[in-house]
Image (cartoon, helix red, strand yellow):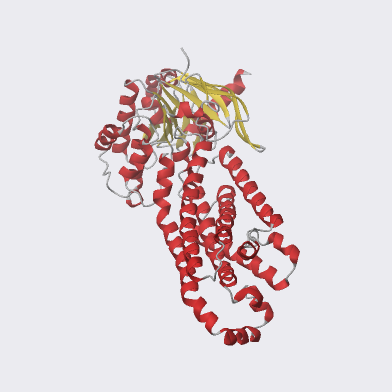
Amino acid sequence: MNVFRFELKRAWVGALIWSLVLTGLLCGLITGALPAFMESRVAVENMLKSLPPAFAAAFGMQMDNLFSFGGFYAFGFLFYSLFGAIMASGIGLDLFSREKREKCMDFLLTKPRGRSRLFAEKLLASLTMIAASNVLFIAASLALYRAYAPQPLMLERALVAASSLLWMELLFFAVGTCIAVFAKRVRSVSGLSTAIGIGGFLLSALQSMLEEEKLNFINPFKYFDAAKAFFDGAFELKYALTGAVITIALMAAAYVRYTRADIPSL
Amino acid sequence: MAYAIETTKLTKYYGKARGIVDVDIAVEEGEIFGFIGPNGAGKSTTIRTLLGLIKKTGGSATIFGMDCEKDKVKILAEVGYLPGEVFYYDNMRAIDLLRYSASFYKKDCTKRITELADALSLDLNKKIEDMSLGNKKKVGIVQGLLHSPKLIILDEPTSGLDPLMQRTFFDLIQRENERGATVLFSSHILGEVQRICDRVAIIKEGRIVDLRSIDDLRKNSYKKVSFTTENPVADFSLAGAGEITQDGSSTSFLYNGEIGALLKKLSALPLVNADISEPELEEIFLHYYEDGEAAK
């Protein structure tokens, strides 16, 4: 497990910062913005009406649910998803392109360790960081839910809704991993992961503005929709399945490539 | 006894591009085997196939009787590899990198790391990225030898080392060899191969063109001779001299024969300047090809 420990040691600080930003944003929105938002409901409604409808839609501000804990919580997911996508794709890119970026593929791959095992240890290190980050996020979500949501509480629904970030992050982690493994070279992990996150955000905004149902299939932030989970108790199966299939397919492709590719000399 | 390395018709194509074709080499345990050829001839391709970094297209390759692809992990536990250019993780001290490297082997390498670092006078607490090319190379050498491998594979290892360090390096390799390690050593510099190897394989355009002992190579060694005389020498000829080119008062040729006879011939000329040197590898190859043609 030396590769696992090595990867964790090199990447945990970044993952911790992202986790704190994510959970901090969640706490800030719910404890700070939500009460103020509810109090000045009329003013906010007027403000939203004055915005171009497409703009409001792009930012996920639908009137119907916004003025409830669940609606506001789910509204925040647009941003949690953006940050989560950047973090998770960054972890995939970072860990799986480390040797490529630092030109030491020869070093790692001439050690007595099979490539499947190397892949598995890197994967485990990634999942450990993503899981830890989500434990924090989910715990904070549930605590806030208990403190701020009106009775009766339905903790199960809140849990499913909070888990939507985890599933979405796994998808983006798979995207990052795939790019890391297939790309000839990876120059900047932070630049690329930000681009991937914003790409996801734009797809989501596109779908909200056009309100085209079919576009949900290419909207990675909607595969595991927190609002849907919060109000209906479950994700919509067809989208959740699409997300799961894409995640697994990308990981499988990355695995095959990582274990079989010829390593060119420098 | 199984060979340390044995390849039979080992072939690698990168798509349609030739890597190596039908490479047959057999390296005995305990020998220092040289692998020479110009850049792009297929030395690295052969080595990388042996190490499982690239997949062969055809033929077979074994190390200590084990298949290079199926038994890769077992083989690599016994192999130390030093590439021509060394790069390591950013922001790491040499000692951290070496400890990480050692953590892949099921033995305690701490003592060996300090021994090797002392022999090479390498500061282990320095960050690798702040090191000079030569010092980075030293980290690579320690990294390749710290687990006392039974087979040492060196791919153009001396680039970036100054002559003094090269000498220390060759001493180190020779000591490892006396300890029982087999060494495969690739280079495009004939001189350094001649210095430590028992046998050499010569590779050109992906194929082994010759395989012989160093003694044999010495006996058949070509010298590059050039001299300048006061006045142009008309129709210079000498048994054993080939590729004679004359340009005014300068004459140059490749010579394969008795040195005494050469000197006798030269001393009879009104010399202004004379130079006898090791020919470039390319020039030797030229001869292998011409010899091959002549034999047909």
- The residue closer to the viewer here, B255 or A241, is A241
Rendered residue at 40%/37% (across/down): B230
Query: Is residue B292 visible to us here?
Result: yes
Residue B273 picture location, percent across and down? 37, 36
Q: Report the residue that reaches farthest toward the front.
A: A152
| Quarter where residue A258 is shown | top right
Left or right for A43, reference B146: right
Residue B179 drawn at (x, y percent): 32, 21
Relative to B18, is A214 above or below? Answer: below
Q: Residue at x 40, y 44 (%)?
A: A5
Q: In this view, does B134 lie above or below B200?
A: below
Name the residue nearer the viewer: A254 or B235.
A254
Which quadrant of the figure has residue A240? bottom right
| Image quarter in which the C terminus of chain B is found | top right
Residue B294, position in %: x, y? 60, 21
Residue B87 shows in the view: no
From the viewer's side, name the closer residue of A203 and B62.
Answer: A203
In which quarter of the view is residue B170 placed? top left
Q: Position of residue A177 (x, y in %)?
A: 56, 50
